[in-house]
Amino acid sequence: MIKKICVFALFGALISCNQDTKLALNYTKGEAFGTTFSIQFIATKEIDLSKGYDSIITVINHSMSTYINDSDISRINKGDSNVIVDEHFKKVFTASEEIFRATSGAFDPTIGVLVNAWDFGPKGKIIALDSLKIDSLLLTVGLDKVTLKENTIIKNNPNTFIDFNSLAKGYAVDVFAEFLEEKNIENYLVEIGGEIRGKGSNLVKKKPWRIGVEDPNFDGDQSYSKVIELRDQAMATSGSYRKFKLDQEGNRYAHIINTKTGYPHKSNLLSVSILAETCMIADAYATALMSMGLEKSKAFLKNHPELQVYFIYEDHNKELKTLAINRFPEN
Protein backbone atom coordinates (compact mmCIF):
# COMPACT_ATOMS: atom_id res chain seq x y z
CA MET A 1 0.00 0.00 0.00
CA ILE A 2 1.01 3.60 -0.18
CA LYS A 3 3.79 4.63 2.10
CA LYS A 4 3.12 8.04 3.53
CA ILE A 5 6.09 9.94 4.90
CA CYS A 6 5.20 13.34 3.49
CA VAL A 7 4.67 15.69 6.41
CA PHE A 8 7.10 17.07 8.97
CA ALA A 9 6.55 18.92 12.22
CA LEU A 10 8.53 22.06 12.96
CA PHE A 11 9.98 21.33 16.38
CA GLY A 12 11.98 23.54 18.67
CA ALA A 13 14.17 22.27 21.44
CA LEU A 14 13.52 18.77 22.69
CA ILE A 15 12.55 19.97 26.14
CA SER A 16 12.28 23.63 26.99
CA CYS A 17 10.81 25.59 29.84
CA ASN A 18 9.10 28.95 30.07
CA GLN A 19 10.03 30.45 33.42
CA ASP A 20 7.19 32.96 33.38
CA THR A 21 4.37 30.45 33.08
CA LYS A 22 6.28 27.44 34.41
CA LEU A 23 5.35 25.27 31.43
CA ALA A 24 7.47 22.46 29.99
CA LEU A 25 7.53 21.12 26.45
CA ASN A 26 7.81 17.34 26.76
CA TYR A 27 9.20 15.58 23.69
CA THR A 28 9.57 11.87 22.89
CA LYS A 29 10.64 10.17 19.68
CA GLY A 30 11.18 6.56 18.67
CA GLU A 31 10.36 3.83 16.19
CA ALA A 32 7.00 2.12 15.70
CA PHE A 33 4.92 0.48 12.99
CA GLY A 34 7.87 0.26 10.60
CA THR A 35 8.56 3.99 10.77
CA THR A 36 9.34 6.73 13.30
CA PHE A 37 7.12 8.61 15.70
CA SER A 38 7.35 11.79 17.75
CA ILE A 39 5.11 13.15 20.49
CA GLN A 40 5.29 16.53 22.18
CA PHE A 41 2.97 18.07 24.70
CA ILE A 42 2.79 20.94 27.15
CA ALA A 43 2.60 20.34 30.89
CA THR A 44 3.61 22.06 34.10
CA LYS A 45 6.56 19.69 34.48
CA GLU A 46 8.49 17.01 32.66
CA ILE A 47 6.45 13.80 32.47
CA ASP A 48 7.60 10.39 31.28
CA LEU A 49 4.78 8.63 29.42
CA SER A 50 7.03 6.20 27.53
CA LYS A 51 5.53 3.10 29.15
CA GLY A 52 2.09 4.17 27.97
CA TYR A 53 3.40 4.74 24.46
CA ASP A 54 5.07 1.32 24.42
CA SER A 55 1.85 -0.34 25.56
CA ILE A 56 -0.15 1.30 22.77
CA ILE A 57 2.40 0.22 20.15
CA THR A 58 2.40 -3.36 21.43
CA VAL A 59 -1.39 -3.67 21.46
CA ILE A 60 -1.91 -2.18 17.99
CA ASN A 61 0.89 -4.30 16.51
CA HIS A 62 -0.63 -7.47 17.99
CA SER A 63 -3.96 -6.52 16.46
CA MET A 64 -3.08 -5.24 12.99
CA SER A 65 0.56 -5.70 11.99
CA THR A 66 0.98 -7.85 8.88
CA TYR A 67 4.71 -8.06 9.70
CA ILE A 68 4.11 -10.02 12.90
CA ASN A 69 3.35 -13.67 12.16
CA ASP A 70 1.07 -14.28 15.13
CA SER A 71 -0.79 -10.96 15.10
CA ASP A 72 -4.57 -11.15 14.79
CA ILE A 73 -4.57 -9.88 11.21
CA SER A 74 -1.80 -12.30 10.17
CA ARG A 75 -3.70 -15.22 11.63
CA ILE A 76 -6.87 -14.11 9.84
CA ASN A 77 -4.98 -13.79 6.55
CA LYS A 78 -3.68 -17.33 7.04
CA GLY A 79 -7.25 -18.61 7.33
CA ASP A 80 -7.78 -18.78 11.09
CA SER A 81 -11.53 -18.14 11.50
CA ASN A 82 -11.44 -18.37 15.29
CA VAL A 83 -9.61 -15.12 15.95
CA ILE A 84 -11.49 -12.80 18.30
CA VAL A 85 -10.57 -9.30 17.18
CA ASP A 86 -10.14 -6.44 19.64
CA GLU A 87 -11.71 -2.99 19.72
CA HIS A 88 -8.84 -1.49 17.71
CA PHE A 89 -9.36 -3.94 14.88
CA LYS A 90 -13.12 -3.39 14.93
CA LYS A 91 -12.83 0.39 14.78
CA VAL A 92 -10.42 0.27 11.84
CA PHE A 93 -12.43 -2.37 10.00
CA THR A 94 -15.69 -0.46 10.46
CA ALA A 95 -14.12 2.78 9.24
CA SER A 96 -12.65 0.90 6.26
CA GLU A 97 -16.08 -0.41 5.32
CA GLU A 98 -17.59 3.07 5.45
CA ILE A 99 -14.85 4.61 3.31
CA PHE A 100 -14.87 1.66 0.91
CA ARG A 101 -18.56 2.31 0.28
CA ALA A 102 -18.22 6.11 0.18
CA THR A 103 -15.47 5.91 -2.45
CA SER A 104 -17.11 3.12 -4.49
CA GLY A 105 -14.16 0.86 -3.74
CA ALA A 106 -11.35 3.30 -4.53
CA PHE A 107 -10.26 2.74 -0.95
CA ASP A 108 -9.82 -0.99 -0.41
CA PRO A 109 -7.62 -2.64 2.26
CA THR A 110 -7.65 -5.90 0.28
CA ILE A 111 -5.80 -4.53 -2.79
CA GLY A 112 -2.34 -5.13 -1.28
CA VAL A 113 -2.04 -8.55 -2.89
CA LEU A 114 -1.94 -6.87 -6.31
CA VAL A 115 0.42 -4.11 -5.18
CA ASN A 116 2.81 -6.85 -4.07
CA ALA A 117 2.33 -8.78 -7.30
CA TRP A 118 3.35 -5.76 -9.39
CA ASP A 119 6.49 -5.54 -7.22
CA PHE A 120 6.80 -1.84 -6.47
CA GLY A 121 9.96 -2.33 -4.51
CA PRO A 122 13.28 -0.94 -5.76
CA LYS A 123 12.89 1.57 -8.54
CA GLY A 124 13.22 0.13 -12.02
CA LYS A 125 11.20 -0.85 -15.07
CA ILE A 126 7.67 -2.05 -14.64
CA ILE A 127 7.09 -5.56 -15.97
CA ALA A 128 3.61 -6.51 -17.10
CA LEU A 129 1.91 -9.37 -15.30
CA ASP A 130 0.06 -12.11 -17.08
CA SER A 131 -3.61 -11.12 -17.43
CA LEU A 132 -4.71 -14.52 -16.12
CA LYS A 133 -2.76 -13.95 -12.91
CA ILE A 134 -4.31 -10.52 -12.49
CA ASP A 135 -7.80 -11.92 -13.02
CA SER A 136 -7.08 -14.64 -10.48
CA LEU A 137 -5.88 -12.17 -7.86
CA LEU A 138 -8.83 -9.87 -8.49
CA LEU A 139 -11.13 -12.65 -7.34
CA THR A 140 -9.69 -12.18 -3.84
CA VAL A 141 -9.99 -8.38 -3.84
CA GLY A 142 -12.90 -6.45 -2.38
CA LEU A 143 -13.69 -5.48 1.18
CA ASP A 144 -17.30 -6.40 0.45
CA LYS A 145 -16.06 -10.00 0.47
CA VAL A 146 -15.21 -9.66 4.17
CA THR A 147 -17.61 -9.44 7.11
CA LEU A 148 -17.20 -8.60 10.79
CA LYS A 149 -19.64 -10.74 12.78
CA GLU A 150 -19.65 -11.21 16.55
CA ASN A 151 -16.01 -10.12 16.90
CA THR A 152 -14.76 -12.49 14.21
CA ILE A 153 -13.85 -11.97 10.57
CA ILE A 154 -15.57 -13.99 7.88
CA LYS A 155 -14.05 -14.08 4.39
CA ASN A 156 -16.06 -15.18 1.37
CA ASN A 157 -12.80 -16.01 -0.36
CA PRO A 158 -10.24 -17.66 1.92
CA ASN A 159 -7.40 -16.09 -0.08
CA THR A 160 -8.50 -12.51 0.56
CA PHE A 161 -5.62 -10.64 2.22
CA ILE A 162 -6.43 -7.72 4.54
CA ASP A 163 -3.88 -4.96 5.06
CA PHE A 164 -4.75 -1.81 7.04
CA ASN A 165 -1.51 -0.04 6.17
CA SER A 166 -3.46 2.72 4.42
CA LEU A 167 -5.10 3.93 7.64
CA ALA A 168 -3.53 2.09 10.59
CA LYS A 169 -0.81 4.70 11.19
CA GLY A 170 -3.44 7.42 11.18
CA TYR A 171 -5.49 5.38 13.62
CA ALA A 172 -2.46 4.95 15.88
CA VAL A 173 -1.97 8.72 15.89
CA ASP A 174 -5.55 9.08 17.13
CA VAL A 175 -4.98 6.50 19.86
CA PHE A 176 -1.91 8.37 21.09
CA ALA A 177 -3.88 11.63 21.03
CA GLU A 178 -6.73 10.10 23.02
CA PHE A 179 -4.22 8.70 25.51
CA LEU A 180 -2.83 12.21 26.09
CA GLU A 181 -6.31 13.67 26.47
CA GLU A 182 -7.13 11.05 29.09
CA LYS A 183 -4.15 12.49 31.00
CA ASN A 184 -5.85 15.92 30.77
CA ILE A 185 -3.22 17.13 28.32
CA GLU A 186 -4.83 19.76 26.12
CA ASN A 187 -1.85 20.96 24.03
CA TYR A 188 -0.03 18.31 22.03
CA LEU A 189 1.31 17.27 18.64
CA VAL A 190 1.51 13.59 17.67
CA GLU A 191 3.22 12.32 14.51
CA ILE A 192 3.75 8.81 13.15
CA GLY A 193 5.44 8.34 9.78
CA GLY A 194 4.24 11.73 8.56
CA GLU A 195 0.66 11.40 9.79
CA ILE A 196 -0.06 14.03 12.40
CA ARG A 197 -2.66 15.36 14.83
CA GLY A 198 -2.52 18.41 17.01
CA LYS A 199 -4.57 20.13 19.66
CA GLY A 200 -4.20 23.49 21.32
CA SER A 201 -0.88 25.22 20.68
CA ASN A 202 2.75 25.39 21.70
CA LEU A 203 2.19 27.43 24.86
CA VAL A 204 5.91 27.44 25.67
CA LYS A 205 6.70 29.37 22.51
CA LYS A 206 3.30 31.06 22.48
CA LYS A 207 2.80 29.92 18.90
CA PRO A 208 0.47 27.51 17.11
CA TRP A 209 1.68 24.08 16.08
CA ARG A 210 3.12 24.41 12.58
CA ILE A 211 3.63 21.62 10.05
CA GLY A 212 4.98 21.48 6.53
CA VAL A 213 3.77 19.70 3.39
CA GLU A 214 6.63 17.98 1.63
CA ASP A 215 7.42 18.87 -1.97
CA PRO A 216 7.23 15.94 -4.43
CA ASN A 217 10.93 15.43 -5.14
CA PHE A 218 11.64 12.34 -7.25
CA ASP A 219 15.34 12.36 -6.34
CA GLY A 220 14.56 11.64 -2.68
CA ASP A 221 15.53 15.10 -1.38
CA GLN A 222 13.26 16.73 1.14
CA SER A 223 11.98 20.29 0.89
CA TYR A 224 8.90 22.06 2.15
CA SER A 225 7.35 25.00 0.34
CA LYS A 226 4.06 25.07 2.25
CA VAL A 227 3.75 25.43 6.01
CA ILE A 228 0.42 25.64 7.82
CA GLU A 229 -0.87 26.04 11.34
CA LEU A 230 -2.57 22.95 12.75
CA ARG A 231 -5.46 23.80 15.04
CA ASP A 232 -7.38 20.92 16.65
CA GLN A 233 -7.16 18.82 13.49
CA ALA A 234 -5.28 15.94 11.93
CA MET A 235 -3.41 15.85 8.64
CA ALA A 236 -2.22 12.99 6.46
CA THR A 237 -0.47 12.98 3.09
CA SER A 238 -0.23 10.33 0.40
CA GLY A 239 2.27 10.62 -2.41
CA SER A 240 3.15 8.81 -5.61
CA TYR A 241 6.67 10.17 -5.99
CA ARG A 242 8.62 7.87 -3.66
CA LYS A 243 7.57 4.49 -5.06
CA PHE A 244 7.15 4.30 -8.80
CA LYS A 245 8.38 2.43 -11.86
CA LEU A 246 8.81 3.29 -15.51
CA ASP A 247 7.48 1.51 -18.58
CA GLN A 248 9.46 1.05 -21.80
CA GLU A 249 8.40 4.51 -23.01
CA GLY A 250 9.50 6.19 -19.81
CA ASN A 251 5.99 6.75 -18.45
CA ARG A 252 5.91 6.84 -14.66
CA TYR A 253 3.52 4.53 -12.80
CA ALA A 254 2.83 5.01 -9.11
CA HIS A 255 2.36 2.01 -6.82
CA ILE A 256 -1.39 2.60 -6.88
CA ILE A 257 -3.51 -0.18 -8.32
CA ASN A 258 -6.90 0.31 -9.91
CA THR A 259 -9.17 -1.82 -7.71
CA LYS A 260 -11.44 -2.59 -10.67
CA THR A 261 -8.85 -3.63 -13.27
CA GLY A 262 -5.92 -4.79 -11.16
CA TYR A 263 -3.49 -2.68 -13.19
CA PRO A 264 -1.38 0.28 -12.04
CA HIS A 265 -2.37 3.52 -13.66
CA LYS A 266 -0.59 6.63 -14.79
CA SER A 267 -1.56 9.71 -12.87
CA ASN A 268 -0.49 13.34 -12.89
CA LEU A 269 -1.43 13.54 -9.21
CA LEU A 270 1.73 13.58 -7.09
CA SER A 271 0.45 14.10 -3.56
CA VAL A 272 -2.73 14.64 -1.58
CA SER A 273 -2.77 16.23 1.86
CA ILE A 274 -5.98 16.14 3.89
CA LEU A 275 -7.08 17.92 7.02
CA ALA A 276 -9.83 16.14 8.93
CA GLU A 277 -11.19 15.65 12.43
CA THR A 278 -9.26 12.41 12.96
CA CYS A 279 -6.00 11.19 11.51
CA MET A 280 -7.49 7.82 10.53
CA ILE A 281 -10.06 9.55 8.31
CA ALA A 282 -7.43 11.87 6.81
CA ASP A 283 -5.10 8.93 6.18
CA ALA A 284 -7.69 6.75 4.50
CA TYR A 285 -9.13 9.47 2.27
CA ALA A 286 -5.66 10.63 1.22
CA THR A 287 -5.09 7.10 -0.09
CA ALA A 288 -8.51 7.01 -1.75
CA LEU A 289 -8.07 10.32 -3.56
CA MET A 290 -4.64 9.31 -4.84
CA SER A 291 -6.32 6.26 -6.32
CA MET A 292 -9.15 8.32 -7.85
CA GLY A 293 -6.91 10.85 -9.57
CA LEU A 294 -7.38 14.60 -9.70
CA GLU A 295 -10.59 15.03 -11.70
CA LYS A 296 -12.59 12.32 -9.92
CA SER A 297 -11.32 13.61 -6.58
CA LYS A 298 -12.52 17.13 -7.36
CA ALA A 299 -15.98 15.80 -8.16
CA PHE A 300 -15.99 13.64 -5.01
CA LEU A 301 -15.04 16.54 -2.77
CA LYS A 302 -18.05 18.58 -3.82
CA ASN A 303 -20.09 16.23 -1.64
CA HIS A 304 -17.50 16.04 1.15
CA PRO A 305 -16.89 19.57 2.43
CA GLU A 306 -15.63 18.16 5.73
CA LEU A 307 -12.38 17.14 3.98
CA GLN A 308 -9.94 20.00 3.45
CA VAL A 309 -7.59 18.96 0.66
CA TYR A 310 -4.37 20.18 -0.95
CA PHE A 311 -3.26 18.63 -4.26
CA ILE A 312 0.15 18.78 -5.92
CA TYR A 313 0.08 17.63 -9.54
CA GLU A 314 1.74 17.95 -12.93
CA ASP A 315 0.01 19.76 -15.77
CA HIS A 316 0.28 18.69 -19.42
CA ASN A 317 3.62 20.52 -19.65
CA LYS A 318 5.00 18.53 -16.69
CA GLU A 319 4.99 21.68 -14.56
CA LEU A 320 4.07 21.44 -10.89
CA LYS A 321 0.72 22.90 -9.92
CA THR A 322 -1.20 23.05 -6.64
CA LEU A 323 -4.88 23.15 -5.82
CA ALA A 324 -6.54 23.79 -2.44
CA ILE A 325 -10.14 22.64 -1.97
CA ASN A 326 -12.68 23.01 0.85
CA ARG A 327 -10.84 25.75 2.77
CA PHE A 328 -7.44 24.10 3.01
CA PRO A 329 -5.39 26.91 4.60
CA GLU A 330 -2.95 29.10 2.71
CA ASN A 331 0.62 29.57 3.92
Image (spheres, rainbow, N blue to C red):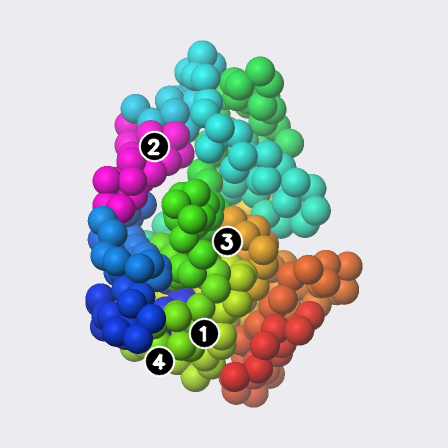
**Above or below, 169 relative to 223:** above
Q: Is mark 3 on a helix, strand or loop?
A: helix
Which mark is on residue 138?
Answer: none
Name which of mark 3 and mark 2 comes first in the sequence.
Answer: 2
Q: Distance between the residues labelled 4 and 3?
A: 23 Å
The residue that mark 4 highlights is 223
Confirm or deny contact between disc 3 and disc 2 (CB under 8 A).
no
The residue that mark 1 highlights is 208
Confirm or deny contact between disc 4 and disc 1 (CB under 8 A).
no
Name which of mark 1 and mark 3 comes first in the sequence.
Answer: 1
Q: How far apart are marks 4 and 1 (CA)?
A: 21 Å
Q: What stretch is highlighted in magenta?
A: 49-69
Q: Which amino acid does label 3 sit on?
A: Cys
**Above or below, 89 relative to 299:** above
Q: How far apart are marks 1 and 2 (CA)?
A: 32 Å
Horizontal side of 242 relative to 326 (left or right) equals left
Which mark is on residue 279?
Answer: 3
